[in-house]
Image (cartoon, rainbow, N blue to C red):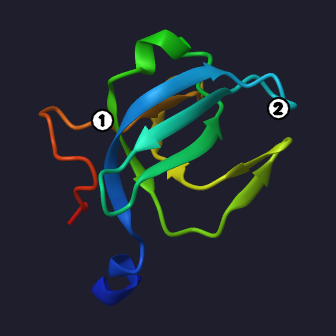
Amino acid sequence: MISYSDFEKVDIRVGTVIEAKLNDKSNKPSIYLVIDFGDKIGEKKTSAQLTKNYLPDELIGKQVAAVINFSPKQIGKMISEVLVLGFPDDTNNPVLVMPSMKISNGGKLF
């Protein structure tokens, strides 16, 4: 078990995908994303193995949930600044966590 204060350390925010393209610098098929988290946080980039359930063009304009306070991580030849969140489908491929209503970019999960 973890305490609520442990949960509060994980900063999960919503942002809007403003750029999405196939990541040809990754060893595994993935999509490079630029996500706008609003004025206070700004734009952050990441790469995620989403190609089984998403086309890059379909993601532009969608809001996604992401952990924004992990240390940057090397993914292939790029540095990922955030971790987008998802659940596994029946074939263990990620389905992104997306709000069902429009949320202001940077909104914090609670």
Q: How many other residues sit within 10 Å of disc 1, few (<14), some (14-19) or many (≥20)?
A: some
Hey, which quadrant is residue 42 in on the image?
bottom left
Residue of label 1: 98
Identify the element where label 2 is drawn: loop
Looking at the picture, tell me which residue is in the foreground, 93 or 98: 98
Whether tag 1 and tag 2 are in contact, CB under 8 A, the answer is no
Q: Earlier in the sequence, mark 1 or mark 2?
A: 2
Amino acid type, mark 2: Ser
Q: Residue at x 69, y 26 (%)?
A: 30
Q: Residue at x 48, y 11 (%)?
A: 57
Query: Disc count in the image?
Result: 2
Amino acid type, mark 1: Met
Q: Residue at x 16, y 32 (%)?
A: 100
Left or right: where 82 falls relative to 59: right
Q: Is residue 88 above or below residue 9?
A: above
Residue 74 x/y as whole percent: 79, 54
Q: For the N terminus, which image quadrant?
A: bottom left
Q: Is residue 52 above or below residue 67?
A: above
Q: Is residue 2 above or below residue 91?
A: below
Residue of label 2: 26
Identify the element where label 1 is drawn: loop
Looking at the picture, tell me which residue is in the foreground, 48 or 37: 37
Residue 23 x/y as whole percent: 73, 25
Q: For the C terminus, which image quadrant?
A: bottom left
Q: Is residue 107 above or below residue 24?
A: below
Hey, which quadrant is residue 73 in on the image?
bottom right
Q: How many other residues sit within 10 Å of disc 2, few (<14), some (14-19) or many (≥20)?
A: some
Residue 101 x/y as whole percent: 12, 33
